[in-house]
Image (tube, rainbow, N blue to C red):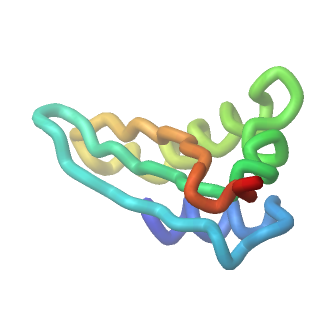
């Protein structure tokens, strides 16, 4: 799942070098964290959340073989913002 999310995200954003994906297991689900540059949040989420929903749909379809549910969290990496 990690590679699929990373591939999709890098194709969408202006700063692909700042895309990171972390994956962790919880009790009944797998959590995939997509961390992007704050300026790319709008591109990854899309108008009315359509891009984010599409990413989650693709991941849900790709993980249908597993018995665990997959959750995709989109996070802005605030350490990359400019400090005045």
**Residue drawn 49% across the image and 39% down it:** 73
Asked if residue 41 lies left or right of residue 65, the reply is right
> Please, which residue is most extreme toward the top here?
48
- Classify residue 46 by image quadrant: top right
- Quarter that holds the N terminus: bottom left
Residue 69 picture location, percent across and down: 32, 35
**Residue drawn 52% across the image and 66% down it:** 20
**28 shown above or below 17:** above
Residue 6 picture location, percent across and down: 58, 67
- Classify residue 17 by image quadrant: bottom right
Disc tally is 0
> Please, which residue is most extreme toward the left here?
27
**Residue drawn 71% across the image and 49% down it:** 38
Residue 43 picture location, percent across and down: 83, 47
Asked if residue 9 lies left or right of residue 74, the reply is right
- Quarter that holds the C terminus: bottom right
Asked if residue 4 lies left or right of residue 11, the reply is left
Task: Please tell me which residue lies in front, 25 or 15.
Answer: 15
**47 shown above or below 56:** above
Task: Please tell me which residue lies in front, 24 or 78.
Answer: 78
> Please, which residue is most extreme toward the bottom here?
17
**46 shown above or below 6:** above
Task: Please tell me which residue lies in front, 54 or 34.
Answer: 34
């Amino acid at each position: 799942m990690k590679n699929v999310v990373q591939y999709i995200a890098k194709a969408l954003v202006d700063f692909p070098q700042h895309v990171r994906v972390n994956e962790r297991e919880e009790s009944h689900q797998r959590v995939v964290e997509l961390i992007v540059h704050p300026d790319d949040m709008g591109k990854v989420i899309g108008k009315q959340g359509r891009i984010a929903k599409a990413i989650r749909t693709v991941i849900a379809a790709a993980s249908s073989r597993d018995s665990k549910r997959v959750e995709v969290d989109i996070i802005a990496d605030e350490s990359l913002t400019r400090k005045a």
